[in-house]
Image: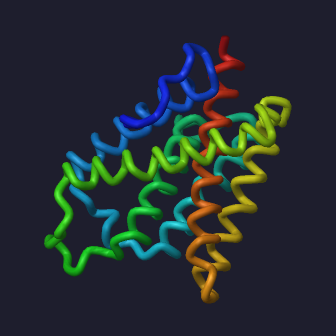
Amino acid sequence: MHAHAEPAPRGSTLQQFDTLVAHCKSIFLQKLSRYGPSWRHFRPASLADQMLIKARRIRTLEEQGFTAVGEGVETEYQALVNYAIITLLQMRFGPAPEVGIDPLTPNQISTFYDEEAEKIRSLLIAKNQDYGDAWRQMLLSSLTDMIIVKIVRVRQLLINPSSDSTQEVVSNLQDICNYAIFALIRLEEIKE
């Protein structure tokens, strides 16, 4: 994933990030193999709506404490990681031109996924220099709320774009991905 990045010490936030992103990518590639790049027909605002649905479901599960359909919050956080990266890819390339016709191959999509994940990882490194692992003291529900706030911002910026909104959308999507990874790390640590 990160050919130029320094290897992370075992058990560090970066090592946990790398492991979880690799797992999310594995899920992404399984779905890409099964369904093809069907998500390439979503517009970024529609993808933001999909993320909002996932985040609101997490909040509902946190508040109710049970699930009626058998999938827990972990699956939803993984979906948020993938939807955030998919949205970044859609912003980079735009929707596929026609149903069944996509200029991007699965191998290219996999490479682009890695490139976006590496940018998100670099952001994590930069922010951790300023904040450390402050997120580790946050409630899991606070991480969910931060994700919802970021998604609402993304939706607003996509619905009412301005000259500088693209970079703001990218920054918020990268934050959504990192907060979802933080939540997945916290969930793993709670299980231990």
Which image quarter: residue 158?
Answer: bottom right
Can you give x and y, in whole percent of width and height, for residue 170 in the image? 56, 65
Position of 35 with respect to 122 (left or right) is: left
Q: Residue drawn 28% across and 40% down?
A: 30
Which residue is at 63% across, 53% downward?
Answer: 176
Relative height, residue 142 to residue 42 (above, below): above
Q: Residue furthest top?
A: 192
Of the pair 72 and 33, the residue shown nearer to us: 33
Q: Position of residue 190 (x, y in %)?
A: 71, 19
Asked whether residue 24 appears in the rendered view, the answer is yes
Q: Quadrant of the N terminus?
A: top left
Q: Is residue 60 left or right of residue 42?
A: right
- The x, y position of residue 172, in whole percent, is 64, 62
| Circle count | 0
Does the rendering let one see residue 52? no
162 to the left or right of 130: left
Residue at 66%, 36% in the rendered image: 182
Q: Looking at the rendering, which quadrant does residue 166 occupy?
A: bottom right
- Asked which colour scheme the image uses, the reply is rainbow
Residue at 82 percent across and 35 percent down: it is: 134
| 162 horizontally vs 32: left or right | right
User: Within the image, what quadrant is residue 13 found in?
Assistant: top right
Q: Is residue 96 above or below residue 74?
A: below
Which quadrant holds the C terminus?
Answer: top right
- The spot of residue 124 in percent (x, y) is 63, 42
